[in-house]
Amino acid sequence: MTDAAKFWAKLWDLEERFWTEGADAARRMSAKGAVFVLPYPAGILQGDMVFREKDVAQRWRSVVMTERYLQRQGHIAVLAYRVSAERSDDPIYEALCTSTYLLDDENWLRLSHQQNPLAPIAT
């Protein structure tokens, strides 16, 4: 595996763990003051608010990320993807997502995350 492939695999692994490992792991992987834009009713959250929000802090049982895109400029990396996630007895959640990571002392920390839920188009 090339160095570039290892780098991107590491970021995609961080992104998946963010969904599946719960609030404590998410806190460790996020920059102080990170901003999250999540579906209603959570809305725009910043810093520790993200990890107190009951709907946000729950971990997902499984996630599948497809339509993956990535871009890196210096110490900033952006991931964009489509997610299908499930937890408990809830219906499968599908959304288009972006996450921005910052390289801080050799650690990649999530600086922002946004989810745009997909809804069926009415016919």
Image: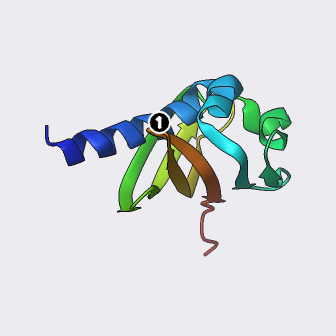
Residue 52 on image: x %, y %: 85, 34
On screen, residue 60 above or below 68: above
Q: Is residue 27 left or right of residue 41?
A: left
Q: Quadrant of the N terminus?
A: top left
Question: Quick one: which residue is furthest to the left in this view?
Answer: 1
Task: Identify the residue at image location x=68%, y=32%.
Answer: 27
* Kind of residue at disc 1: Leu
Q: Is residue 35 left or right of residue 94?
A: right
Question: Image quadrant of residue 89?
Answer: top right
Visible residue check, residue 68 = yes
Q: Element under label 1? A: helix
Task: Identify the residue at image location x=62%, y=53%.
Answer: 113
Q: Is residue 46 left or right of residue 82?
A: right
> Which class describes the residues within 10 Å of circle 1: few (<14), some (14-19), or many (20+)?
some
Q: Residue 99 versus residue 115: which sits nearer the camera?
A: 99
Question: Quick one: which residue is furthest to the front in this view?
Answer: 105
Q: Which residue is mark 1?
A: 14
Residue 88 on image: x %, y %: 67, 25
Residue 74 on image: x %, y %: 39, 61
Visible residue check, residue 88 = no
Task: Identify the residue at image location x=40%, y=42%.
Answer: 11
Q: Quadrant of the C terminus?
A: bottom right
